[in-house]
Image (cartoon, rainbow, N blue to C red):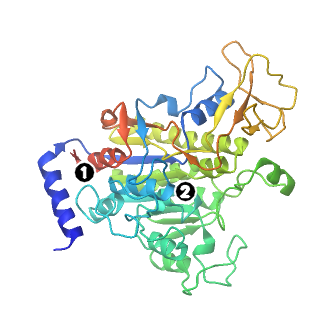
Amino acid sequence: MNFLSKAILLFTFIAAVNAQTLPTGNVIFIHPDGTGLSDWNATRILYYGPDGELNWDRMTNLGIYKSHMLNSISASSHAGATIHAYGVKVLQDSFGMNGKEEVAAYSGKALSIMEEAHAAGIKCGLVNSGSIIEPGTSVFVASSPSRSESESITKQVVMSGVEVILSGGEEWMLPEGEIGFHKGEGKRTDGTNLIEWAKDKGYVVVYNKEQLMTISPKTQKVLGVFANGHTFNDKSEEVLEEEKLPNFKESAPTLAEMTEKAIQILSKNQTKFFLVVEEEATDNFANANNANGTLEALKRADDAVGVSLNFIKENPNTLLITAADSDAGGLELLGDSGLDPEKNLSNNEKNGSPIDGKDGTGSLPFLSAPDMYGKRLPFYVAWSTFGDAHGSVIAKTSGLNANLMKNTIDNTEIYKIMFATLFGVYLK
């Protein structure tokens, strides 16, 4: 008996001994990648004011999130997603595996939580504002020794059988030389056209917001291909201004629109479902130190939270859970009483940290939405890194089994809370 087999038997025994029975229902996991508490505070202030409220604020239970890896204090997106999908610590360079080795989930099975759910007849969906290869969603149905194996990862996601797949990434679905709907060229070297494959398997394929919004109510399976790469332009404010590009591509649906449509399809006939949603732009814009893009992206993630909370009102047998795996860019918010809203900011704080106003470095400060007295207050953003900091990540829950969220939780416990709600067993 090899090591993996022994580990699976051990985990299965532990799970059986420590099981706690709970009510089951739907799970919606929203992952605004790379967001810490400061990101949420800045988004609230910008869009709703210092006294306002995000949809995220209305979620009922929260926990301080411990994001360390098996061999690292700092997280990576692919290892963080693997921990969410399998419930066990892995090495920092892991994509649905533990480094280059197979990994058994905390349940004891050599399956991710979504693979286990789908095998049990639960409808499943993946929604991402980024490319289909982004690990925040793809790791739930794909494994690879390397994050860079985009062809293999894309093929695994499309062929996973999950009912809803909405993202960008057309370039990895088409053979080399083939021009796609979004005018980009395919990159697959195996000659496979995954879009045609999906059509043959009964998927309705849509390419933009209008097509997604008008698909038949009878649709059972859908593949959304909303960009050649990402549905956003993850560059600095200055580069986007120079290239005359918006933060997000106008033809693509928003994260909230994708989330709402995914829920409609998956919840049809009141079947149990599991939906994983990622706003990838929060991470990518923050890694580019683009405050404007980061805050718009997080507003979009919060809108998706609002869609999910509205669904829970009518369907209380649903858990909504949110968490990031790191704090990208280390965003901090500043705005003292002497800040002049009509004067361009300097390029750096006194300690050298780069700072951003509403249009990037050296621009005017952001202005908050009105506070309770009708005042709009100026503020700006300071950055600590281009990378993914440990930061102050907060996880939250609402709905069914929301009380499983503790005051302080390890990243492995995201899996346990979702598993408990899908299968009725809390694995201790």
Task: Identify the residue at the far bottom of this view.
Answer: 191
Say above or below: 134 vs 385.
below
Q: Please state which amino acid type lies under the numbered disc 2.
A: Asn
- From this view, report whether residue 213 is shown above or below residue 334: below
* Amino acid of disc 1: Phe
Q: Is residue 163 left or right of residue 333?
A: left
Circle 2 SS class: strand
**Which residue lies under the disc numbered 1?**
423
Q: Nearer the viewer, residue 249 or 352?
A: 352
Q: Nearer the viewer, residue 416 or 75?
A: 75
Residue 301 x %, y % = 57, 43
Disc 2 target residue: 128
Residue 268 seen in the current view: no
Q: Quadrant of the N terminus?
A: bottom left
Residue 329 in percent (x, y) is at: 63, 44
**Residue in the image at 34% along x and 61% along y:** 112
Give the distance between the C-alpha atoms of the residues marked 2 and 1, in whole angstroms: 25 Å
Q: Residues within 10 Å of mark 1 (few under 14, many from 20)?
A: some
